[in-house]
Image: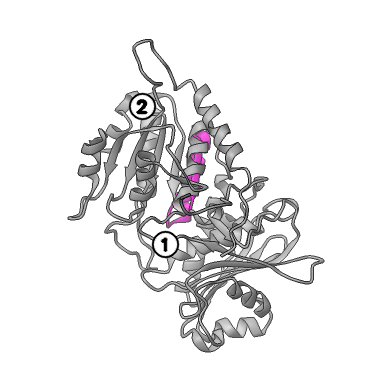
Amino acid sequence: MNVPPTRLRRRELLKLGSVAAMSPWLSLRADEAKPKLPRVAAINSIYRLRSHAYHIAGRFIHGYTINGLHHQPPFQLVRMFDHQQPADDLGPEVCKKHGIELCSSVAQALGGDRLDVDAVLLIIEHGDYPLNERHQIQYPRFEMFQQVIDVFRKSGRSVPVFVDKHLSFDHHKAAQMVAASKELKVGLMAGSSLPVTWRIPELAPPLGTAFEEGIAIIGYDRSTWEIYLFHVLEVLQCMLERRPGGETGVKSIQTLSGEAVWKAGDEGRWSWPLLEHALSRCPSRNYGRVREQVKNPLVTLIEYSDGTKGAVFNLVEATSDFAFAGHIKGQAEPVSTCFYLPPPPGARFFDPLTFNIEKFFATGRSPYPVERTLLTTTMCDHAIRSQHNEGKVITDPSLLIRYQAPEDGGHFRGRFIDRS
């Protein structure tokens, strides 16, 4: 693969280091050999090999690679709470080895009413949790966040909180989380690694890009669809949010399956040429025609408030890569890219996510608005509801979320392997 040249990485590393160095959290006494680092607590659903906590909290412990070189976060993970302890639980071993206090509650991990940590990782992904009637995993992100907020209220202060992936399977709970963060002036960042991973070929549309239509694709059948539906919505949204005037929200959501997917394309509700452009960027693309390959296609059709058209697909037999393609007003040729995810066990797409979390913890300002994640969370919930109701078109005021995209979305450029 041709890897795009690095941009901004050295400048952002220097910025992160200087912010951390100037932070009031850091102190240096005469009897100390090195500065006291900002203290981080990790609230996890589960800590086992390849879990999200293993990848994110683990990078705060061990460091990770940026542009081929080792980077050690200027933070100290001091406490960990794991909601579940399966037979392959790594939590006790990791905590004992690295001097991390393994706690029995969320409040204890934050220092109780004293709140003696400077930032919180809330990583509630993976583990044994029930499904609801719509096959959504009922992860207790909302409930764990409420326990964090309770400590903030009792202590009289708050610290930045990162919430991994979508805010909740339920958009009502997600909205409550954002509202509570604004009430208490809590710095809140959320979302997946997809918007910040590498893009091949490099594609970073400037603010004001006049997208008229965009699609995003994946193929996934290893578990409930909601897991990857959120990811592919993040792929679509981090591109289409760069339209002139910023994001103004979504008018309607509809999920179709089977032959209805192809029929919608034939009727012009989504673009066949855009689908082909997106597939052309996928290293895993299968041979043959997608219409003949895919046995049970899924598409969620998104009508934005300003008339822009969006669609996200699950095409199991056609690809296992995430890709985007979009039409820009006045341009004959679409733009397209693959969102590259280096595979497990290292799963280096967690490198750019962790780096953006570091920037957030150092400054208290999320690199991208939490409203993006609130919108993708809400779209995900309504898309699943539409699917459960046999393709019902959903219009709901909860989708009318407005925000301005950042000038730079924080995705990584450059190397994703170590320098020799």
Q: Position of residue 381 (x, y in %)?
A: 48, 61
> Looking at numbered disc 2 in the image, what kind of residue is underneath it?
Leu
Disc 1 secondary structure class: loop
* Residue 377 percent coordinates (x, y): 50, 56
Label 1 or label 2, whichever comes before in sequence order = 2
Q: Say which of 127 and 96 sits in front.
A: 96
Query: Quick check: 361 left or right of 125?
Result: right
Residue topped by disc 2: 115
All told, the count of numbered labels is 2
The circle drawn on residue 343 is 1
Q: Residues within 10 Å of mark 1 (few under 14, many from 20)?
A: few
Q: Is residue 190 magenta?
A: yes
- Give, as a single range, the part of the protein colored magenta: 167-192
Q: Is residue 270 left or right of residue 128?
A: right
Three-letter residue code for mark 1: Pro
Task: Specify whether residue 85 is in view.
Answer: yes
Q: CA gap, disc 1 to disc 2?
A: 37 Å
Residue 307 sits above or below residue 269 on the image: above
Residue 120 is covered by the magenta coloring = no
Residue that appears at 35% across and 25% down? 116
Image spot of residue 391 (x, y percent): 52, 76
Q: Is residue 382 above or below residue 278?
A: above
- Quarter of the picture containing the N terminus is bottom right
Q: Closest to the observer: 222 or 305?
A: 222
Q: Determine contact: label 1, label 2, CB under 8 Å.
A: no
276 relative to 99, above or below: below
Which residue is drawn at the image coordinates 46% and 48% (left, top)? Answer: 351
At a point 48% along the width and 60% down the height, the residue shown is 341
Look at the image and name its color scheme: one colour
Q: In this rendering, which labeled residue sits more in front, label 1 or label 2?
A: 1
The answer, for residue 165, to whether it is visible in the render is: no
